[in-house]
Amino acid sequence: MAKQIWKPGNMLYPLPAVMVSTADREGNTNILTIAWTGTVCTNPPMTYISVRPERHSYHMIKDSGEFVINLTTEDLMRAADFCGVRSGRDTDKWKECGLTEKPAVSLKYAPIIEESPVNIECRVEKTEELGSHHMFLAKVTAVRTDERYLDEKGKFDLNRAGLLAYSHGEYLSLGKKLGTFGCSVKKKAPSKGRKKQKSEAAKTGGRVRRKRMKTRRTGEK
Ligand SMILES: Cc1cc2nc3c(=O)[nH]c(=O)nc-3n(C[C@H](O)[C@H](O)[C@H](O)COP(=O)(O)O)c2cc1C
């Protein structure tokens, strides 16, 4: 297999393309799209976003120390792109994208985007000035989820929301389910047919199973 060697850069994909809503302490709010984000700690729940200081939102986050990560879906793809190519300096992105601003439950300034299925409310703990981007390391202060995605058993079925992924300049929707966490080591539950065979075999000391296997091999009915 031939491989090319590229100069160092970021090729970690897919990533989420989230809409981050924020505000300054005067109550001016804005949205920007962020792909440089991720989970960094489970307990306490910590996340980060990396933002270029020239972004209009940057100074809002610096000022209030608050932001909300709003997950995006197929339906929000156009809004997510728009919020990533237009600046709040000269555009009201809420209005242009038809998005609804609602107060957060745990923050004073930054609002949530109502249309997003999951709103992750965050308070900045530390800012790392890395270079082109400054990383806001933040504590998650509350998570809000859309009840539309609760199944009959009350389980939150997030993957029904049509989550959006960003990969190498393109937006994609998540594809088909291939497995679940730990599936590679999980013992397969015997199928109904096999279960029946097993219990018959237990009763007959394995005779039924051997007979069936022979039948399967030879194709006899
Ligand atoms: C898919 C996508 C991902 C982006 N990711 C980031 C990012 O991680 N950090 C960043 O500073 N800008 C990122 N941007 C660019 C900003 O969202 C964009 O410059 C935006 O217009 C800034 O808005 P503002 O000036 O209103 O704050 C991204 C844009 C897109 C379309």
Image (cartoon, rainbow, N blue to C red):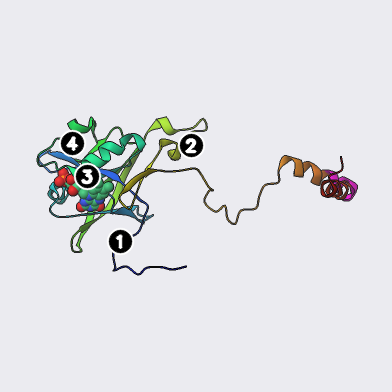
Instruction: Identify the element where label 1 is drawn.
Output: loop
Callout 4: few (<14), some (14-19), or many (20+) C-alpha neighbours within 10 Å?
many
- What is the magenta range? 200-207
| Mark 1 lies on residue | 10
| Mark 3 lies on residue | 84
Q: Of callouts 3 and 1, which one flags the residue occurring earlier in the amino acid sequence? A: 1
Q: In the rendering, which numbered label is found on residue 93? A: 4
Whole-Å distance between the Cαs marked 4 and 2?
A: 33 Å
Whole-Å distance between the Cαs marked 3 and 4?
A: 10 Å
Q: Of callouts 1 and 4, which one flags the residue occurring earlier in the amino acid sequence? A: 1
Quadrant assignment, res 3: bottom left
Q: In which quarter of the image is the C terminus?
A: top right
| Mark 2 lies on residue | 155
Q: In the rendering, which numbered label is found on residue 122? A: none
Callout 3: few (<14), some (14-19), or many (20+) C-alpha neighbours within 10 Å?
some
Three-letter code for the amino acid on which mark 3 is drawn:
Gly
Whole-Å distance between the Cαs marked 2 and 1?
A: 35 Å
